[in-house]
Amino acid sequence: MAKAILAPREGEAASFADRAYYAIRELIVTLELPPGAVVREPELTARLGIGRTPVREALRRLAQERLIEVYPRRGMFVTKVDVRDLARLCEVRAALEPEAARLAAERATQADLDELGALLVEVRSSRRRDARSLIDLDERVHRGIYQASHNPFLVKTLEEYYAHALRIWMVALARTNLGAAVGEHAAVLDAVVRGDGGRAAELMRAHVEAFEAAVRDVLLSE
């Protein structure tokens, strides 16, 4: 069974509310709950096998992160994908992702370096991967770099914006060169592992901007 996209690391989903949050976010990001879909709390409770209170807490958190919109007397809906959001997300990610890469190069522990080194080997591998596996690898690379920055505020912020960017990527998935996009991480990871923060930041900025340009071209051509 494929690993869930944006799944928590072991030990992160400690509460039922956390479990509900990650599970519902997964449904939204992978478009199982598509943009504009009605969010029905009883259906989610039954589907996830989690109580109403944790699901409600999770939905409140997702609303704060703008993945769900709440309208009084109308209900809850999955936020629609707006192509204009792509440029706005890129502005934020192009500022913060390079900083995370720079900090990771400077602060990575040996455990971090072991994980990032293993990811580098995986990215460079010639093994064929399907779209789901490529997206999972992309997520693990980004999260690995975020965590190695050892700045919890930066980690939380970037993970939120990564989820938004990934959802837009899923909309354009069929016409995006996933292999090339994920392969760009090899140079970033190499710079981080070598401790070259300036180079890591430069490469990460280029990656984020290239991602935005590629997905924008797909969405605007539809």
Image: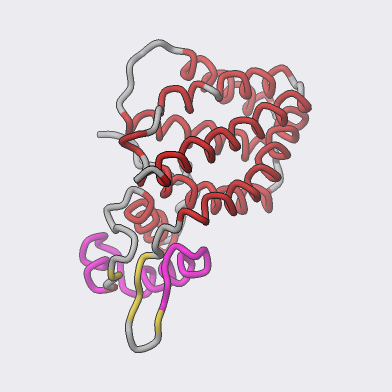
Question: Where's residue 184, x and y in %?
Answer: 54, 23
Any part of residue 95 in sight:
yes
How many labels sit on residues?
Answer: 0
| Rendered image quadrant of residue 21 | bottom left
Q: Can you give x and y, in whole percent of width and height, for residue 89 in the image?
A: 58, 51
Residue 4: quarter of image? top left
Res 116 → quadrant: top right
Which secondary structure is most common in the magenta stretch?
Answer: helix
Q: Is residue 183 magenta?
A: no
Which contiguous range is marked in magenta?
A: 42-70
Query: Residue placed at 30% from the left, 64% from the top?
Result: 50
- Is 93 on the left or on the right of 107, as rendered? left
Q: Is residue 116 above or below residue 209?
A: above
Picture residue at 52% right of the left edge, 56% below the top? 85
Q: Residue furthest top?
A: 126
Q: In the current view of this chain or complex, which residue is farthest to the front?
A: 221
- Tell me: 117 left or right of 79: right
- Residue 192 locus on image (x, y percent): 68, 24
Q: Nearer the viewer, residue 157 or 89?
A: 89
Above or below residue 125? Residue 25 is below
Horizontal side, residue 14 vs residue 39: left or right: right
Residue 221 locus on image (x, y percent): 38, 43
Residue 61: within the magenta?
Answer: yes
